[in-house]
Every structure is written in structure tokens, then in C-alpha cells.
Amino acid sequence: MGRENDTGHLIRSRYGAVAQGREKGCCGEGSACGGGLAAIEASRLGYSREDAASVPHGADLGLGCGNPLALAALRPGEVVLDLGSGAGFDAFLAAERVGKTGFVIGVDMTPEMVEKARSNAKKAGKVQVSFRLGEIEYLPVADASVDVIISNCVLNLSSHKGQVLKEAFRVLRSGGRLAISDVVQVKAFTSAMEEHPDALCA
């Protein structure tokens, strides 16, 4: 239990520093997931130039590793939940796709990220987006209230992925969809790699 608490603290601390601009994300320039979506990087991850240019300034911290929206097939009027929403990049893009009759909820465990996302939403006048502080293993979201769940490079950070999926099932409406972009471990880590902070926060 102690190691899990340490891991959660490390993740909050690292991503809090990224939100405040005191540290760059684990997905910095030259990494697998890029640092800030320049046009060529946006295209590589499956975003259009228009996508990258349309989000509020400060929403793109370059922390994703793909494009869950490419899988989600969002429709106007749908309610979308973004797990680990960070500063709001995918949430704001989702809001454009579901339109004024839809709604987007972002959940993040890092207070500084939630604060930054809320500030971004306010500056951009995005009223159909709400950001909540919470853990993806215990979502602050009502049962059967969401049409689509998206997540971008976040599930790998959870030590309890089964619980995350259980919560996803709880909040999804009948016929709901789950669109996840994430990294996958294809070979065993050494013990030194498992203990390294960058491995925990990547």
C-alpha cells in the first residue's frame, strides 16, 4: 500500500509541476508522444492542423500518445467523459464535436491540472465543458450518465486498471462506447526501470 501511495503522490507532483510550467511533460520533444502538438506532430498522432489550432492556448501540454477522438465517432448531443483530462486538449476537441447540445466532463487527479483546464475553459468561453477533481478508479460521475468515454495516455498510470474499467462500465449508458489511446508494455521491465520516476509518469 505504501508504494501505491508513493506512486500516486509522485504522479500528482510530476503532472502538477507540468501544469504550472515548472517541468516539461514526460512526453517531451523527441519522445514517442511528442511535446506540444506542432503541425507535423499533430498529424502523426491523428489530429488535423485545425484541431491543433482550435484548442484554447495552454490546453496542449503534449502529454498524449495518440488520438482517442479518431476512435470515438462522436455525435452531436452526446455526453463525453475524458479520463485524465489534463489541461483539456481532448475535452475541448470533443466539445466541438458534440456541439451545444452535448456536454463534456473531464476528470483529473491533479489539482493544478483541473485548475488550468477550468481557466482554459473560462478564457475560451467553453460552457459545455466541466472539469472535476477525482481519480479514474473512483469517478465523481453518476451511474449511466455518459455516452462515450475517451482517454489519452492515462490508463497506464493506474495500478488498478480493472477498477478503472469497472467504473467506466458503471458510468456508461447502455450502448456506450470506450475509446482509449495508450502505451502498451511489450516486454518485461527491469526492477530499476520499474522504480524509475520517468517510467511511472510516462
Image (cartoon, rainbow, N blue to C red):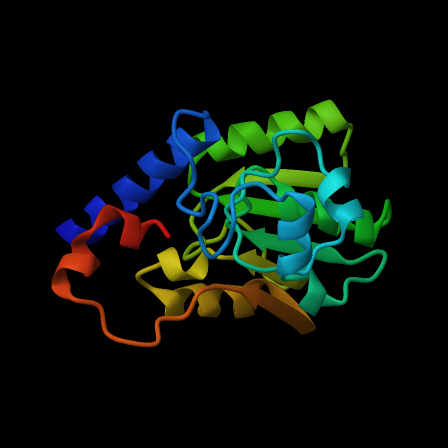
How many circles with numbers are drawn on the protein?
Answer: 0
The residue positioned 42% from the left and 37% from the top of the image is 110
Position above or below: 72 against 12:
below
The residue positioned 62% from the left and 54% from the top of the image is 81
Name the side, left or right, on which 151 lies relative to 198: right
Tell me which corner region of the image, top left, top right, bottom left or bottom right, holds residue 43: bottom right
Name the one closer to the observer, 87 or 39: 39
Residue 146 seen from this side: no
The residue positioned 75% from the left and 39% from the top of the image is 53
Name the side, left or right, on which 152 lies relative to 189: right
Name the one closer to the observer, 80 or 24: 24
Name the side, left or right, on which 200 lies relative to 48: left
Name the one closer to the observer, 162 or 189: 189
- Residue 108 place in picture, x, y as percent: 49, 44
Position above or below: 166 against 29:
below
- Residue 155 place in picture, x, y as percent: 44, 61
The residue positioned 46% from the left and 57% from the top of the image is 32
Name the one closer to the observer, 156 or 143: 156
Q: Quadrant of the N terminus?
A: bottom left
Name the side, left or right, on which 4 lies relative to 61: left
Position above or below: 111 against 109:
above
- Residue 176 place in picture, x, y as percent: 68, 71
